[in-house]
Amino acid sequence: METHSKKNDFECDICNETFSRNDSLIRHMKTHSKENNFKCNICDRSFQRKHCFAMHMQKHQEKKYDCKKCDRSFISLQHLNQHERVSHPEIKLTSVKRGTASTPEGNSKRVRREGGALNTFTSTFFQPTENSKKDFLLFFDEITPQLKEKIEEEIQEKGAVKWYGVVNAVFKRESEDGGEERVTPYFRNNVQIELVGDTVGDHVPASFTKILEAVDEFIRRGSGWILDKIVHFELCVAKYQPLRASSYIILPKKLADKKAVLNIQNEDQKCLVWCLIAQLKSLAHNIYRVSHYTPHEQEIKLDGVECPVPLNKIPIVERLNNLRINVFGYEENEVFPLYVSKRVDEECANLLLIASDETQHYCLIRNKSRLLGDLTKHKTKHHYCYRCLHRFAKVEILKEHLQYCSEHSP
């Protein structure tokens, strides 16, 4: 409870200012010192603060990114894109692949994501101008035409696409010792799906609104943060291919050890059907065998929906069976929502979609608290929001959160 005490036990012997923590006093004492502890071994300049020294050292880094229109070079792709945006607007912004690492020689190495249910995204960066780098609304107005054009190009190239945007910005505030603190948070919108180009005009401003809500929430909770500058907007696009779940896949060991998921051992394409029966019937014995569920197969209505059932047909299955269904993905030991039902029924089937190479497989989540339990060191049961997967200790708090989350989630 010492951290919540108002008592200031650490006093500066120069100006008599007091602090509740010794490390705060140490940082404060540096403001009275003329000593520069961080020295550059290239140009002999020195600095009192580590972050000022780090920013200075960037100037000495090897400049690997050359402008094709002039003789200037830059230490990062972001700096190059910003220069081209201002000085050479006729040049299209550089795109890079997520999961691609560039070497100094210009070669690239593609990193394959094993067991993934999602496609590789292509990223395009948009930098602000001097006029818009401190104003989100002005920046969004500025990049809207190029952003729409880029998404429409991706639709023409790939057909249906899914995309989301991420804004990186720098915020600052005054620290306890009179110095300056800086953070570089990321704000992103929900994934948008474009089957044709006609919907882009509506989705882009809606995505900006979502990001601005996240920024407002950050400022409200952050106590004193103000925007210093916008770094870039990253557009991430991938080909949209509705997932189809098919035959049995062995669970990864870490997932199996949680004993939170029922993985039915089917050899057909009906894993979704068997999972729904398992949810409704709650059978106690031989729960992994398909033969235990086949007598009840006709109780699940599909009415023309073919197996394996793709993700975008889940709403139809919900309507036919009067059942709420949520689907979660699992990739690189992370659980994330793939489809969240708009229904509010008390009864809900939570499914986990796992993947191996070209095969996907539905499993039934029997215990979500145990599935997500390694996110915290506390071993007691928790309640999770099925939309954002935030954790709550009491069901009453979760219910209050759900009312807000349902209005701000995809």
Image (cartoon, helix red, strand yellow):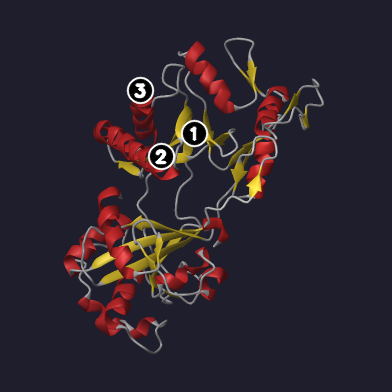
In the image, is residue 342 above or below residue 108? below
Is any part of residue 88 visible from this angle?
no
Left or right: 401, with 374 as reference point = left
- Whether pointer 2 and pointer 1 mark residues with C-beta atoms closer than 8 Å, the reply is yes
Percent of width and height locating residue 267: 41, 74
Label 2 or label 3, whichever comes before in sequence order: 3
Percent of width and height locating residue 26: 69, 42
Report the residue marked by disc 3. Answer: 138
Left or right: 408, with 266 as reference point = left
Name the residue type under label 3. Leu
- Residue nearest the observer in this picture, 12 or 23: 12
In the image, is residue 246 above or below residue 217? below
SS state under label 3: helix
Marks 3 and 1, how far apart at CA = 17 Å
Dot label at residue 219: 2
Label 2 or label 1, whichever comes before in sequence order: 1
> Label 1: how many residues lie within 10 Å, few (<14), some (14-19) or many (20+)?
some
Is any part of residue 95 visible from this angle?
yes
SS state under label 1: strand
Marks 2 and 3, how far apart at CA = 18 Å
SS state under label 2: helix
Percent of width and height locating residue 154: 39, 33
Report the residue marked by disc 1. Answer: 171
Left or right: 329, with 32 as reference point = left
In the image, is residue 69 above or below residue 239? above
Name the residue type under label 2. Ile
